[in-house]
Image: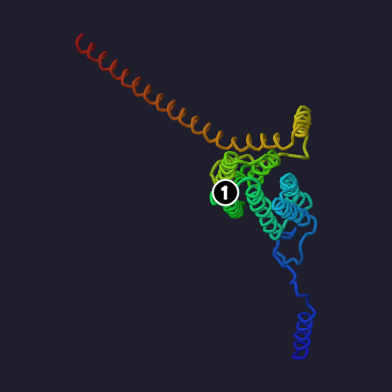
Amino acid sequence: MSEKQDDRAESLRSEDEIRLPVDEHVEEEVSASGKKVRAKGVYLLPNLITTGALFSGFYAIIAGMGGNFEAAAIAIFAAMILDGLDGRVARMTDTQSAFGVQYDSLSDMVSFGLAPALVVFSWGLGPLGKLGWAAAFLYAACAALRLARFNTQVDTVDKGVFIGLASPTAAAIVASMVWAGHDADVGSGLAFVAALVTAAAGLLMVSNFHYSSFKKLDFKGRVPFVMMLAIILVFSLVTIDPPRVLLVIAVIYTFSGPAAWVWKMLRDRRSASVAAGEGTAEVESKEGSDGETEESAGKYSDKQ
């Protein structure tokens, strides 16, 4: 018995000796039977797409530092497309994992947090000095807070909504602004506007406004024929002037959150006023009926 244990210990030591410097990733996942199992390695396809998004964000930073702002903005939009694909591919191929979730979050921080902040600072916030880098840092910090909050609420919040502006949409606002003005001479006025837009996009990421996530759309099901015409129309409009059309679409989506909040507040206030009016009318009608009852009783006693 002791010889077997010695052989086993020796084999384990030999495995440790030949093990590569990069340790193997092991994580627990739920099998098809519902039991927790320890799985080694990572899924290639979704993490490969995430790596592409990370590369796009990194390239955007390099291009922005080199003054190629058009390429930097396009790289951020490329990261958005890849970021939208990795999660859907993982769900379609049943290759979701905790490693993929964390890797995707870190990739988003680079592509939609650091990259837009550094690109917009290199493009137009530099002339503002400390105010410029403060606005860029505010955006980057809010992106980190937004991603951290999303990771902690992912299992408790409705999948159909985002609480706060999603980081890819905030990055789309900043990137399309830079793309639209990549060849413009940025003066103090335009720089101040860029700082306001950057700071506002950052603060909206950590707000409590609700935005549609479009995750409940059924891409496998049938849709009305007019939906295909609408999609073709959107693509046609984007090809006319991509940076400005994308900026308009991002701004409209950004304002949908505050607009929905204002509409809900007005609707709740109207419902409260209607309920209060109905309560007052009910009280008055009750008092009127009581008065009529007392009056009829008095007339009956007089007749007697």
Toward the viewer: 109 or 198?
Answer: 198
Give residue 10's position: percent from left, percent from top.
Answer: 77, 86
From this view, report whether residue 274 is shown above or below residue 252: above
Pinpoint residue 203: horizontal percent, then vertical percent: 55, 46
Residue drawn at x 60%, y 49% as measured from the top left: 126
Towards the viewer: 155 or 104? 104
Give the residue at mark 1. 132
- Vertical position of residue 100 compared to residue 177: above or below: below
Instruction: Note whether 28 is above or below 3 in the view shown.
Output: above
The quarter of the displayed image where residue 163 is located:
top right
Q: Residues within 10 Å of mark 1 (few under 14, many from 20)?
A: many
Instruction: Return the x and y of residue 236 as percentages of the image width and height.
Output: 78, 31
Which residue does the image show at 68% across and 59% down from the upper left? 98
Residue 254 visible, this angle = yes
Question: Residue at position x 70%, y 50% from top?
Answer: 64
The residue closer to the viewer here, 177 or 217, is: 177
SS for callout 1: helix
What is the basis of the colouring in this image? rainbow
Res 163 seen here: no
Q: Amino acid at mark 1?
A: Gly
In which quadrant of the rendered image does the C terminus lie? top left
- Numbered circles on residues, count: 1
Which quadrant does the N terminus fall into? bottom right
Residue occupying the far bottom of the picture: 3
